[in-house]
């Protein structure tokens, strides 16, 4: 059986306000080049034939083209415009998915995803329809109820969710035909709301989402 075509939707439509920088965090330098370039290169290293869709803020597309020239970035890719919510940004990216495939959706500011995590996600999604990476917390975890009450939770029962989240395209396109809901915090929550069970696979602890200046350090 031939392997399904693969897409990467790199979600870089955010403004990165929590970083406190003058430009969106995905464009900040990490090891002498923008974070987003590192993230893309992880996927092209895994599969040079993967089809790349970048979701960018509309007013930063010209800036992105300048960065590509400055850093000699010549990898083929298509661009979709970011939406009001992450949900809308992914919808816009999905409008460029043209064939039956597996689709990885990845946060542009997760440059340290491992090749092994990417491979686990695609391998399971191609067999079971979807795959979402996670790690277990190392700290103790408590659930807060009200202002003063809390209770301990078994951290072995807690999963910290990462990206890439990988889905068969027919499942993803159908799920994203829904109306936006505030409970849609990631792609897995959208697909789960459409009636699908989510398959968790092991992520890697280095795969942090760079959100604050401390994360960048």
Image (cartoon, rainbow, N blue to C red):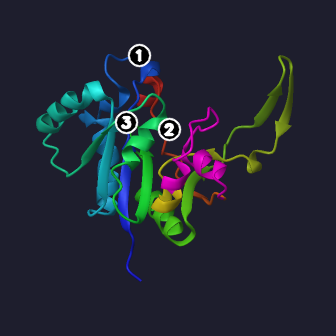
Mark nearer the N terminus (2 vs 1): 1
Of discs 2 and 1, which sits in the foreground? 2
Residue of label 2: 87
Q: Which mark is residue 12?
A: 3
Residue 108 vertical placement versus 58 (above, below): below
Which contiguous range is marked in magenta?
172-196
Whether residue 179 is in magenta: the answer is yes
Whether residue 64 is in magenta: the answer is no
Q: Could you say whether the residue bearing mark 2 is in a helix, strand or loop? A: helix
Give the alpha-carbon distance from disc 2 to disc 1, as whole Å.
Answer: 23 Å
Residue 149 vertical placement versus 208 (above, below): above
Mark nearer the N terminus (3 vs 2): 3
Q: Where does the image place residue 154, in percent across and percent down from the top left?
A: 81, 45
Contact between labelled residues 1 and 2, with CB atoms less than 8 Å apart: no
Give me the residue at 64% from left, 51% from top. 192
Q: Where does the image place residue 98, in percent across and percent down from the top left?
A: 33, 59
Residue of label 1: 20
Question: Looking at this view, is 95 or 87 the one in front?
Answer: 95
- Image quadrant occupied by the C terminus: top left
Of discs 3 and 2, which sits in the foreground? 2
Q: Quadrant of residue 147?
A: top right
Q: Where does the image place residue 193, in percent across and percent down from the top left?
A: 65, 48
Q: Could you say whether the residue bearing mark 3 is in a helix, strand or loop? A: loop
């Amino acid at each position: 059986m031939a392997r399904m075509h693969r897409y990467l939707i790199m979600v870089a439509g955010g403004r990165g306000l929590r970083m406190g920088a003058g430009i969106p965090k995905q464009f900040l330098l990490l090891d002498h080049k923008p974070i987003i370039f590192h993230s893309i290169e992880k996927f092209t290293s895994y599969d040079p034939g993967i089809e790349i869709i970048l979701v960018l803020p509309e007013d930063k597309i010209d800036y992105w083209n300048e960065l590509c020239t400055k850093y000699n970035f010549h990898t083929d890719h298509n661009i979709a415009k970011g939406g009001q919510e992450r949900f809308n940004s992914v919808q816009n990216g999905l409008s460029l998915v043209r064939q039956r495939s597996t689709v990885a959706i990845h946060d542009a500011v997760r440059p340290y995803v491992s090749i092994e995590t990417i491979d686990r996600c695609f391998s399971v999604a191609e067999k079971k329809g979807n795959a979402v990476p996670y790690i277990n917390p190392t700290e103790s975890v408590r659930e807060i109820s009200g202002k003063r009450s809390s209770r301990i939770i078994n951290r072995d029962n807690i999963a910290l969710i990462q990206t890439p989240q990988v889905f068969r395209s027919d499942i993803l396109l159908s799920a994203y035909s829904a109306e936006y809901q505030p409970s849609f915090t990631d792609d897995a929550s959208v697909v789960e709301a459409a009636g699908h069970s989510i398959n968790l696979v092991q992520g890697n602890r280095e795969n942090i989402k760079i959100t604050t200046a401390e994360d960048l350090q």
